[in-house]
Image (cartoon, rainbow, N blue to C red):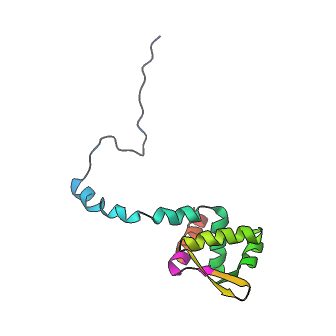
Amino acid sequence: MSENVVKKTPKDTCYTFCYDEELVQRVQPKVEEVLGVELIFKALSDATRLKIAYALTLENELCVCDVANIIGSTTATASHHLRLLRNMKLAKYRKEGKLVFYSLADEHVHQLVSIAIQHSKEV
């Protein structure tokens, strides 16, 4: 018995291959601007670091000990994640005696995290 195999094309793809050459030439060089941006999303893709970043949108500044208690971890774990956020230029810190306080690096990071949280609630 032979069967006819009909190859179905997904509905979310083009049926023919064509492109707008002028559009491609205009946009293609600009997409190179994303180089390095993936590292920001990679840093925030970790659930613990995202929780920390979100906590820092709710409070302007948090001590490492407070962060550890908020995320339910040791201070060593909290410090590790905060250091990574700092190294990625997503957070900054200041020392006050024996305490270390962290905050988000700037308003852009605050907006990025806030918008992501807002979007997740809509979906």
Residue reaching furthest left? 22
Q: In what quadrant of the picture does the C terminus appear? A: bottom right
Q: Quadrant of residue 115?
A: bottom right
Which residue sits at x=67%, y=65%?
48
Residue 6: x, y in percent?
41, 26
* Horizontal and vertical percent position of residue 112: 53, 72
Left or right side of 1 for 48: right
Question: Which residue occupies 41% across, 63% down?
Answer: 35
Residue located 35% across and 62% down the image: 32
Q: Is 63 on the left or on the right of 43, as rendered?
A: right
Query: 11 or 29, which lies in front?
Result: 29
Image position of 16 with respect to 7: above or below: below
Q: Determine whether, in the image, residue 8 is placed left or right of residue 94.
A: left
How many numbered circles are shown?
A: 0
Range drawn in magenta:
103-110
Please, which residue is most extreme toward the front here? Answer: 98
Specify whether residue 73 is painted magenta: no
Does the magenta portion include 108?
yes
Q: Is residue 86 above or below residue 100?
A: above
User: Residue 52 versus residue 83: which sits nearer the camera?
Assistant: 83
Instruction: Report the front residue among 74 and 107.
Output: 74
Quarter of the figure with residue 53: bottom right
Percent x, y for residue 21?
22, 53
